[in-house]
Image (cartoon, rainbow, N blue to C red):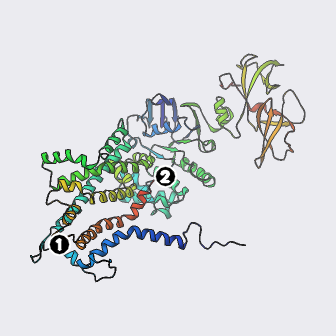
Amino acid sequence: MADIELRGLTKRFGKMVAVNDVDLDVEAGEVMCLLGPSGCGKTTTLRMIAGLEWASAGDIMIGGRRVNDLPPKKRDIAMVFQFYALYPSLTVAENLAFPLHAEKASPEDIKRRVAHIAKLLELDHALDRVPGRLAEGEKQRVAVGRAIIRDPTCFLFDEPLSRLDIAVRQEMRSQIKTLLTGLKRATVIVTHDQIEALTIGNRIAVMRDGFIEQVATPHDIFASPANVFVAGFIGTPQMNLLAAARLPDTKGRLTLNVLEQPLVLDIATANRTLPPPGQVITLGIRPRAFEPMSEAGADTLGGTIDVIEPLGAETLVHLTAGGEDLRVVLARGSGLRPRSALRLRPIVSQVHLFDGEGRRIEP
Amino acid sequence: MIFRRKREIGKAGLGRTAFATVISLIYFFPVLWIILTAFKSYADALAIPPKFIFEPTLENFYSVFSRSYSAGAEAVDTGFDLFFFNSIFIAGASVLLALIIGTVAAYGFSRHPLKGNDTYMFIILTTRMLPPIIVIIPIFLMFRVTGFAGTYHGMILLYSAFNLPFTIWMMKSFFDELPREVEDAARMDGSSEWRIFFKICLPQVKAGIAATAVFGLILTWNEYLFSLLLGGRDVRTIPVAMAQTIGGDIGVRWGLLAAIETLFLIPVVLVTFLLQNQFLRGVTFGTIKR
């Protein structure tokens, strides 16, 4: 049984449906990332689990107990807030000890546990300071410390790293990952940063407009996105999503009209549930799933180079082909020139196909 | 030619500082004149041209509290010790009461809004939209029926009610500025709503409470009309008593009046001075976002 179970969870604000019939399981020791653009309902979902918003419909189960009608403090959860939400008038030590007062812990016990957390999170030096006098990274650690000091069934994180600058963020990311691995609790992290989700999460739930689009491991969500939205949302630079009309097969191989050029993909059509020829499908190819070719062929696409953006180890090339923009990442120093022609062959094993409704066509 | 800046950018030069000083002295002059007059003898106070150099005397301060009303008669108690007590007690108690009720109410309005919250807030403010001279008639009747006229509790309740709208509006804006997340965090950490209010929210609006208290105190301290019409004889406050002191058998005693005013200034100046750090933070609250 999962430690957090959501069944048909729905939240309406007036006529607006913020969270729509969400089902989700988070096992003990698992880190679930809720990922999505702003306004997709991920924070509302988290706040409903926390008990800071009432669910309009559906069930929230924590540790096998239905908690819909319980106030936050009775749900056995701890939360780290986006802006840390430290108590500004209390010192770091008092902030850490705050949740323990509700437990009616003894003064010795409080002292011992605060010292333990302070040591774990390297906050010993700051215990007597008020939050206003801490660096961003320290504030973040106090917020985490305040959550873990109570040892609840599950943890909730709301955009935990969004306020940190890049260097501190990377450090905190691995710290949090290590910490969560050690704690072995069911954890839900809300983020709009896919790198954060891909690195910290054991599984990712991609949300849009109140719906969960896909729940999968970071690898699966990248390798086989369930639909066009997930495909376009995960991965940088963004996947090329090209409208393609199906042409009659070439020797049993899938043939498409894409970017106003015919393209033969080495994909057998026999055992697939493909729409019939003449129908429009979406062809998804990640910018890194192209090979530059010296010669034209039926399995290549041609375009004109617009802009070249060096990314360091690689180079991002924007091409125009058939009036559309195509993003391609190539190895550094490929000797490319703007306005010159370039031929590319999609790597067939990394090509994604989506039907007219944008759903993934499984191989 | 190389132009060298002699002072830091953003710091005023000597000329501007002097100019500002002169302007502030012009503004401060009436207060200064009152304080000087308070230490003058009767003759010095009326001297023309005005005297800046004179022999200071405490005679006026003595006669604030005890003096003879006609020439040659024995000095009697003027009752001003009582009036000072009245002013301090009534102003202090009513501002305190308004702060207690107003802060809790403001928190309620801010955090647990009613249906039509803004309408309630507006109605609360309308009680302060009429000039006191209009409001005084129904209040006078109420005080007569309830027997509140001329009593401490009557005056304290009246001034509390008078301060309440302002306190609620002011404190609500302070609570509105507080990040809700902090309260959510406390809620998750197992705090009751009262504990959140006392432990988390109140300490954050300390500056706002100080600012509200100072405004309320100054307003109440200087109030004249209600005290005159409803205060009766024994619950008179200083402004009323002061007005009644003007005039007498030998014309206006300017020195005496100035002495009362000087004493009258002390508590307000003292309170404002003690709270000034909090107060300044309070009035500039919210101007710098986190």
Q: Is residue B142 left or right of residue A51?
A: left
Number of the label disc, if any, that sits on residue A147 = none
Residue B219 versus residue A238: which sits nearer the camera? B219
Give the residue furthest to the right: A295
Q: Secondary structure at mark 1?
A: loop
Residue B242 versus residue A44: which sits nearer the camera? B242
In the rendered structure, which amino acid carries the disc numbered 2? Ala
Where is residue A360 drawn, in percent x and y?
67, 26
**Chain at tag 2:** A
Where is residue B214 drawn, in percent x and y?
33, 59
The quadrant where residue B113 appears: top left
Task: Give the foreground label among 1 and 2.
Answer: 1
Q: Is residue A191 visible?
A: yes
Give the residue furthest to the front: B48
Q: Is residue A245 left or right of residue A232?
A: right
Q: CA distance from mark 1 to mark 2?
A: 74 Å
Give the residue furthest to the left: B73
Decide: few, some or many residues near mark 2? Use Cα within 10 Å; few <14, some 14-19, many ≥20. Answer: many
Decide: few, some or many residues near mark 1? Use Cα within 10 Å; few <14, some 14-19, many ≥20. Answer: few
Q: Is residue A89 visible?
A: no
Q: Secondary structure at mark 2?
A: helix
In the rendered structure, which amino acid carries the disc numbered 1? Ile
> Which quadrant, please, contains the C terminus of chain A?
top right
**Chain at tag 1:** B
Number of the label disc, if any, that sits on residue B250 = 1
Please name the residue that numbered disc 2 is placed on. Answer: A143
Mark 1 vs mark 2: tell me if same chain. no
Whether pointer 1 and pointer 2 mark residues with C-beta atoms closer than 8 Å, the reply is no
